[in-house]
Image (cartoon, coloured by chain):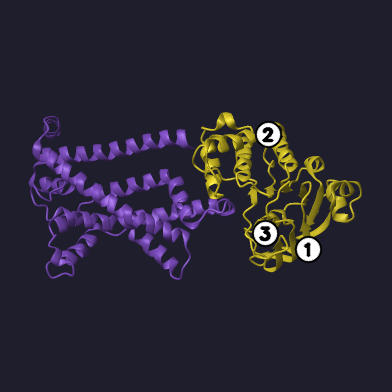
Chain colours: A yellow, B purple
Amino acid sequence: MRDRPTTLPISFQDVAYVAGTTPILRDVTLSITSGPPTVLLGPNGSGKTTFLKLAMGLLTPVAGNIVYSEHRNVVRRRQAIVFQKPVMLRRTAARNVAFALKAAGREQDAPAIARLLGAVGLEALAERPARRLSAGEQQRLALARALARDPEVLFLDEPTASLDPAATKAVEEIVTCTAESGVKIVMSTHDLGQARRLAGDILFLAKGRVMEHGPAAAFFAEPATSEAKCFLAGGLVT
Amino acid sequence: MDGLTALELIWSGDANLFAVVGLSLFVTLSATIVASALGMPFGALVGLTRFPGRNVIIVLLNGCMGLPPVVIGLVVFLLLSRSGPLGSFGILFTPQAMIIAQAVLIAPIIAALTRQVIEDLWAEYRDELIAMDVGRTSRVATLLWDARFSLVTILLAGFGRAAAEVGAVMIVGGNIDGFTRVMTTTIALETSKGDLPLAIGLGLVLIAVILTINALAWAVRGWSERHAG
């Protein structure tokens, strides 16, 4: 069990976000607590990426508050995020991990780098330029960089969106292992099968609002809103 | 016939010709180093920060990329002439004056192109670096390092512009034989005198120097991209 100060729960209190003049999220009130992965579902433009960036602190809400660990202004150093298309720094895979370790203020020794690359199955590609890795390998390297921060909460923005089934399986195994080690996973996906495999609870967004938030089994068995029913049935939620 | 004589001059290692080549390389390389030391950090700063008047700075930088060398030569001449504000240094008609003129000519080019490269890279890296808690100084260092291949190309553009320039160094250097005579000014002078072999020989060397440096940079860039990504 982790005995260090926690950033969980992350509480959204009437949070709204507007890009230019376009409302992206509104009236979001919920708590992200420790436990199995929380999976964000919803159609394109529903606000999933914005939600993750707000939670990560990369965006500032135009209304409402996001409170970490029941204290405002907590230093949120134990969070990490993997973007849908992670940017690979122009250096080898090992040096990408070393960069993340240094940024997190951690030791950048060879065993630490090897352990992180091993955790994502990239130890054999340590000296390969990161930009020359395949999409799946880049996604795994991005996970290694995120894990270099020793996060308590790991945000994943559609981490398998452009991957083939084999690469998707590899990423899902890392996510499962990471969640089992006690890291809270909050991820978005369009893949309902993946959501069923990984989710402990579901956060369903549509039209910039949280339509449903609850246990995954209940959501898939009996969605409460017409939007969720339509989404699960493969209909177009506008 | 003139062409053959020119090749003979090169092949025989003509002292006069290679003295001119040596001075040209010294002046242009020095100017490129000075302009890079000033232009790259300034370009990176403008690319990464937001401040009142930033757009004006960008327009001015971009506009200065096309400044006529003779105008820059004239301005530097006025600054360095005995009655000018920097006349007390006494460096007019010296290689130092030529370095200053070439540096003033290419610094805006290097700054403007660096600004664009760094700004584009920052747009790509922004979320990732902030999410990793990378500090401000480290961000700049990371961007400069990751843009290194593009920055080398920018340096080459600056070097090429300086090496090919004639008007500014003619005005502030005075084209003094054995002291401030460089390849471009010598080519202009010898052509007007009708000494075509030396002019052609220098022209060939000038082209060869620029092609060699570009080829080397291209090779280094290719090697680096294969090994560093």
The residues bearing labels 3 and 1 have C-alpha atoms spaced at a distance of 13 Å
Q: Is residue B22 visible?
A: yes
Q: Which mark is residue A101?
A: none
**Label 1 neighbourhood size at 10 Å, few (<14), some (14-19), many (20+)?**
some
Q: Position of residue A27 (x, y in %)?
A: 77, 66
What SS does tag 1 mark?
strand
Q: Which residue is mark 3?
A: A54
Residue type beneath disc 1? Thr
Q: Which label's residue is closer to the chain start, 3 or 1?
A: 1
- Which quadrant of the structure image shows residue A75? bottom right
In the displayed structure, B128 sits above or below B62; it is: above
Q: Is residue B65 left or right of residue A19?
A: left
| Residue nearest the observer in this picture, B55 or A12 | A12
Say yes or no: labels 1 and 2 on the same chain: yes
Which sits in the foreground, A30 or B165?
Answer: A30
Q: Amino acid at mark 2?
A: Ala
Under mark 3, the amino acid is Leu
Residue located 14% across and 66% down the image = B87
Residue to which mark 1 is pinned: A29
In this rendering, the answer to whether A32 lies above or below B4 is: below
Query: What is the quadrant of residue B35 in the picture?
Result: bottom left
Q: Relative to B197, is A106 on the left or the right?
A: right
- Say the numbered circle drawn on residue A167: 2
Is residue B66 shown left or right of residue A101? left
**Which numbered disc, 1 or 2, marks the residue closer to the eye?**
1
| Comparing labels 3 and 2, the label whose residue is closer to the camera | 3
Q: Horizontally, is B6 left or right of A87 in the view? A: left
Q: Whole-Å distance between the Cαs marked 1 and 2?
A: 35 Å
Q: Eyeballing the image, is B223 above or below B125? A: above
Q: Is residue A238 visible?
A: no
Tell me which numbered mark, 1 or 2, is placed earlier along the sequence: 1
